[in-house]
Amino acid sequence: MEVELIDRIFVKPEAEMICAIPISCLGANDKMFWGFSKKGKFTVRSTYHAEVQWQYERRGSTSEVRKDAEQWKNLWSMDVPGGRRHFVWNALNNALPTKSNLFKRKVTEDSLCPMCRREEEDVQHALWCCPAAADVWDENSSHVRKWLNQIHDFSRLWSELSNRLSNGCLERVVAIMRGIWGRRNAFVFEDKFASPGHVVRTTLAGLEEYQEANAKMEGSRVRCEARRERRRWQIPVGDNCKLNFDAAVDLNNRRIGIGIIVRDCNGDILAAV
Ligand SMILES: [Zn+2]
């Protein structure tokens, strides 16, 4: 019964791998376990290392692996909201719920693109080749326009983009890609269709707002560290003790925390609370 269920949900190779997992003869309860980290807990970092390892095993070429690792590094260091980075990560791992992927898992009856209804909707089609996506790229006068429809594989496209574009330009491309996917979802699930110009304007405005807020936070962090550096603790004079205290307020949870420390003229701690 379970085997039939697995066969219905997964494609054949995946179903075979699942059914090959040995089942505990002690009758222990199932639990979630991620095999690429020591403690069995999922972390993005562990998938990065696993991917690099797979690439290495597949190609056996360190230079290729290094190039790929560089691209992943570019992805995680981009100044875009975290969700955008994970979006590209999912796209690169073919983990977006495109019609093609849903069809393979027997969730939908066809794999046709819901926007143009002309071709199969895989990641590359949804974000790049579909006429609906092309309209959005047409709106944006960035450098990427000339590569439109020439590349049919998303990993290769990402490789080209991250090698050729400046960081700022790549960040805008990522924001627009996420905007195209969001627009596609709004069309499928809410029957809304935003104009290409609207997609570009809203995604780029959102990115600008995020980067400005990030720059302000970075500025205040640097100022804070400089202030802390200037106000380094000094030993009290003579036989005196020194008491320092600090407080933090959590407005959301209506809580306050206070810390107090007393040290003598040698800097030894006499009391802390
Ligand atoms: Zn399409």
Image: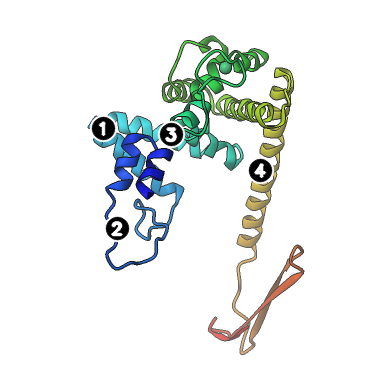
Residue 126, placed above or below residue 49 = above
Q: Nearer the viewer, residue 214 or 225?
A: 214
User: Which disc is residue 264 wearing?
Assistant: none
- Tell me whether the residue at label 2 lies in contact with that at label 4, contact meaning CB atoms closer than 8 angstroms: no
Find out if the beta carbon at label 2 lies less than 8 Å from the nearest ligand 1 atom.
Answer: no
Residue 225, placed above or below residue 12 = below
Residue 236 % position (x, y): 62, 81
Residue 204 % position (x, y): 69, 28
Q: Nearer the viewer, residue 69 or 19?
A: 19
Compare marks 3 and 1 and give the one earlier in the sequence.
1
User: Residue at coordinates 65% horizontally, 17% vertically from top-left?
Assistant: 136
Identify the secondary structure beneath mark 1.
Answer: helix
Identify the secondary structure beneath mark 4.
Answer: helix
* Mark 4 neighbour density, 10 Å: few (under 14) some (14–19) many (20 or more): some
Identify the secondary structure beneath mark 3.
Answer: loop
In 3D space, how far apart are the residues under numbered discs 4 and 1 (Cα atoms)? 38 Å
User: Which disc is residue 93 wearing?
Assistant: 3
Q: Is residue 166 left or right of residue 46?
A: right
What amino acid is found at the position of numbered circle 2 in the picture? Ile
Which image quadrant for residue 85? top right
Q: Look at mark 1 in the image and give the residue it sits on.
A: 58
Foreground mark, 2 or 3, reads 2
* Quadrant of the picture in which ligand 1 is shown: top right
Q: Look at mark 2 in the image and give the residue it sits on.
A: 23
Of all residues, the one furthest to the front in this rendering is: 1
Residue 104, placed above or below residue 1 = above
Q: Look at mark 4 in the image and give the residue it sits on.
A: 214
- Tell me whether the residue at label 3 lies in contact with that at label 1, contact meaning CB atoms closer than 8 angstroms: no
In 3D space, how far apart are the residues under numbered discs 3 and 4 (Cα atoms)? 28 Å
Compare marks 2 and 3 and give the one earlier in the sequence.
2
Compare marks 2 and 1 and give the one earlier in the sequence.
2
In 3D space, how far apart are the residues under numbered discs 3 and 1 (Cα atoms)? 15 Å
